[in-house]
Image (cartoon, rainbow, N blue to C red):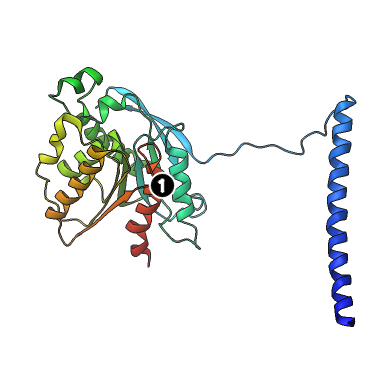
Amino acid sequence: MLSLSLHDRAKERRVTKKTTMRNQILISVLVLLANVLNGQELPEKISETDFSIGKAIGIQSLTLNEKRELNIYLPASYAADTSKRYPVIYLLDGSKDEDFVHISGIIQFGAFKWINMNPECIVVGIENVDRKRDFTYPSQNKLDQEEFPTSGKSARFIRFLANELQPFVDANFRTTANKTIIGQSLGGLVATEVLLEMPDLFDNYIIVSPSLWWNDESLLSRQPEPFDSIKSIYIAVGKEGETMERLAKELFRKLSDQNSQNTELHYEFLEDKTHGDALHIAVYNALGKIFRSKNE
């Protein structure tokens, strides 16, 4: 009985303490509301500072004959350790109001030591000017031409990536040779075109919900250019209808037929995602598949 009594007393003290704290908080809130209602000013802020997850840089492209905006995420250790170099992830649709912020967050999270999903990386988000122009090759399909009147300039955009953007990033930031591209929808279409036409431009390809229907699915008929370097390729699609799902699977099969010992090939069907929300979880999964085995 004595031990039970002591237990009850301890429990009662804890309950009393919690009740007292709640009452103190409630009293503070009521006093604050009373002051507001009586016209008294709220306490001044103690301090306020802005914070940033990266920097915005404008470069003039001779290839595209226009200025292009880049959003750059640098890892936390970048300023502290000036001897360290970092892989680079190139993000299509990389505007601040598109995919730059949330994809950079996934990459930052994956680099935490207790997660160890991917290494610390530099992220280069490429803001769009005209994605229908830059992410599509010429189409003979009349409906494509009508709905995308500025289309067909992907070859020029790919030259910009190869001849201007990558050299600029390597010259201005401490980079390793390892490069990744992330593309979704039309971005997935142009990422696939790069993979088939200029595979050595990137080491890792994250291709999500690619719009391979473009020009009557003709990209899938192209013969991939051979490569000797090690590649990791991740393809994903959500529940997006028969055409999108079939074409993503066909791309995976095409690459499987061409697969070499130097290629890691991954495919995921995200049955609980759609075209609008597949990218976030796909990139998270892709980083784990591409980088985790290399970190272990």
Q: Is residue 256 left or right of residue 167?
A: left
Q: Quadrant location of residue 16?
A: bottom right
Question: x, y percentage for residue 161?
Answer: 27, 36
On screen, residue 71 above or below 20: above
User: Which class describes the residues within 10 Å of circle 1: few (<14), some (14-19), or many (20+)?
Assistant: many
Q: Is residue 241 visible?
A: yes
On screen, residue 223 above or below 134: below
Question: x, y percentage for residue 7?
Answer: 84, 75
Q: Is residue 162 visible?
A: no
Question: x, y percentage for residue 69?
Answer: 39, 29
Nearer to the camera, 229 or 99: 99
| Residue under the point 22% across and 34% down | 159
The residue that disc 1 covers is 122
The kind of residue on which mark 1 rests is: Ile
On screen, residue 77 above or below 273: below
Question: x, y percentage for residue 136?
Answer: 22, 29
Q: Quadrant location of residue 188?
A: top left
Q: Quadrant of the C terminus?
A: bottom left
| Furthest residue in direction front, as rendered | 1
Nearer to the camera, 155 or 273: 273
Q: Is residue 114 left or right of residue 276?
A: right
